Amino acid sequence: MEDNLVIVESPAKAKTIEKFLGKSYTVTSSFGHIRDLAKKNLGIDIEKNYEPDYIVSEDKKKVVTELKKLAKKAGTVWLASDEDREGEAIAWHLAEVLNLKPETTKRIVFHEITEGAILKAIENPRNINQNLVNAQQARRILDRLVGFELSPVLWKKVKPSLSAGRVQSVAVRLIVEREREIMAFESNSSFKVVAEFTLSDENGKQSKLTADLPKRFQTKKETLQFLEDCKASTFKVEDVVKKPARKSPSPPFTTSTLQQEASRKLGFSVGQTMAVAQKLYESGKITYMRTDSVNLSDTILNGSEKQIKSSFGDKYAKRRTFKTKAKGAQEAHEAIRPTYIEQDKVSGTNQEQRLYDLIWKRTIATQMSDAELEKTQATISISNSEHAFVATGEVLKFDGFLKVYIESTDDESQEEKTSSLLPPLKKGQDMVLSSVDATQRFTHHPPRFTEASLVKKLEELGIGRPSTFAPTISTVQQRGYVVKEDRPGDERNYEVIRLKDKKIEEKTKTEITGAEKAKLFPNDIGMIVNDFLLKHFKDIFDYNFTARVEEEFDEIAEGKLEWSKMIDRFYNPFHHKVEDTLEKSERSVGERVLGKDPESGKPVIVRMGRYGPMVQIGETSDEEKPKFAGLLKGQHIETITFEEAMELFKFPREIGTYEDADMVVGIGRFGPYVRHKSKFYSLKKDDDPLSIEADRAIELIEEKRERDRNKVIKEFKEEPELSVLNGRWGPYISYKKKNFRIPKTTDASKLSLEDCMKIIKSDKPAPKKRKKK
């Protein structure tokens, strides 16, 4: 009989924990949740006080059978899932499904997977915390009710196959509202003026000094007048002010700040950051990665101090404690930090090493001295003007924590902000003007959200918790409401007026503006669904209401609120609203009438169709069937013009012949294409379907043919359904729409038909990649 069985959520975690426990402990994994709400009848019995109907999913039945066998043999079962609400729920489901006896079942938690933490947890077991379980259940049940009741409303009133979520729809609302701010934004220009002066010291050594004019001129006329004034002016140092300044390190990482910094510094998506952090946690390298606490243990404070003093010296060490300010902060976890602070590097993938390095540096920096700076500001008077130039300089007197770590920001200002050391200046000193540049600058629209800045906004509003940020952001993209992409920007002319050697010279230059990298854009369907939900369910998707629901989950976790009462208070008015909307509301497809077709006089309408946004000429009720055309990528229902819409009806476009067959450009469900001899060739991102010519179409046809030729290794006349092909992961056999692996030691080009049939008979088809839920 086995003495002890320890159950964790993941095999990686089990492998790490096994190292620290003796032979009397068997460590195994449940592979996450073993059961969930049934799909049938909501999985919730509303009449029985919202009683959940949990079932073991098909893919977990084998796991459960194995766990039951192991549990029967064990004297004590230790449930060692994560220390948050989700982990507590996993432990509770295990206890229920495996029929574990309370007297032989122990719940243990730890926020780091180290020998000390595991052994301490074994010494201090507790019972399953039902309040935490109830908080998780309440979230799951509420989200199921909202999703299952709202989705059919969207199918009937907007478009089939849509879905809605309580927190996800609020995240979409933020992105849509920001996009509309950008659409309504009108850019204004002004002239930024920068002067360069030449100084000579007592030894005749020259140096340069750059100074800005704090005022910006709104018109070219004002700017030219100022430069004329400068022509005949003398310049003098009116004042020099020096001020000491200090800069303190940011707190250690929480889930959201780690996601933000990993996005800015490493280019990681929010989901990628969490996946890499989970690997680091499960292999015992960092503490638990879902936390909103900035607390650090005494052990780590002492270790950091020792590490800093030995590496940089005593003056670099400064012990600090931080207090958690997060709205509705959950259980008293620690911040995300290395488990062993003396390890500044770890083994693992490149991503794991980079993220660990970021966490290590941030943690060490929190225990280091402030950086000390000296800021200098010099005011330079202009004899013929009421304005004055200002030169600013900054010198680092003591680097402190900056020796290790500099935090990034989300500031998207297009202008560089640099401060450097100024040359020695004295009040009353005369300055020699070298040149003055007045550059036309434009106001910039509010920035679009990145994944990380959206997390920051959700956290500020009190919406979501550390465990929900990443799933929320991936869900809105998977549903097609939001897309993350780069956009190239547009060319823009701007003016530069220069005064040099008493002469004024004007130039027009070109710059790229509006380029976006990894930003979140709402799709048309996201905007239409957002508008529909806000029109009919405004209270539920209100920011304050959503934040209040999160606070109620926290109250359930603390045992201050009964979960079923909280659900009931939400569900009753919500359910009535759903029924009312189904009965009384009209369909919403974002329809806009753009004008009248000059040929037929029929209305030109842009709206959401079954396969996406489209333009139609005529009404569906007309005797003559309407004409339809799909929108191009980058065109939107809200912004497309009448002229742009009419251009879409030029498709299909005949652009010439090739090999005695017509080449036709059209737009399909999957974007623009060239059709030639009944085959379709997709246009590339840079190809404009309205202007593409025959030469480019031939290039695309031949490129595709070349790819197809390289794909086929071997074909057999006797068996046309069988072919040996080149794939992404190497050669494989395709037979009757199924793929079969070719052994690595086999030369695919020498395979006979008989060899292929042997491989097919001996091998099972390669498994299809399962979609993650």
Image: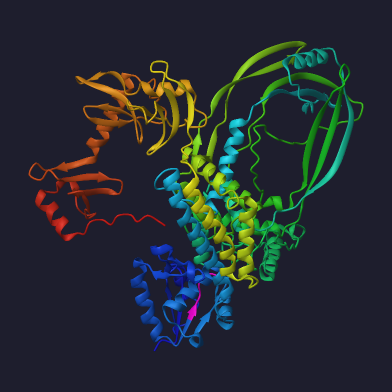
The residue closer to the viewer here, 467 or 167, is 167
- Predominant SS of the magenta segment: loop
Q: Is residue 609 left or right of residue 47?
A: left
Range shown magenta? 78-82
Where residue 479 appears, x then y in whole percent?
Answer: 45, 48
Examine the rendered structure and indicate whether residue 132 appears above or below residue 605. Answer: below
Residue that extends furthest to the top in the rendered view of this protein: 503
- For the view shown, which residue lies furthest in the right direction? 428
**In the current view of this chain or complex, which residue is farthest to the front?**
584
Q: Is residue 596 above or below residue 100?
A: above
- Say which quadrant the C terminus sits in: bottom left
- Indicate whether 521 appears above or below 132: above
x then y, percent, for residue 293: 65, 63
* x 39%, y 46%: residue: 160
**Residue in view at x 57 percent, y 71 percent:** 132
Image-based side of 496 in relation to 89, left or right? right
Question: What colour scheme was applied to this rendering of the protein?
Answer: rainbow
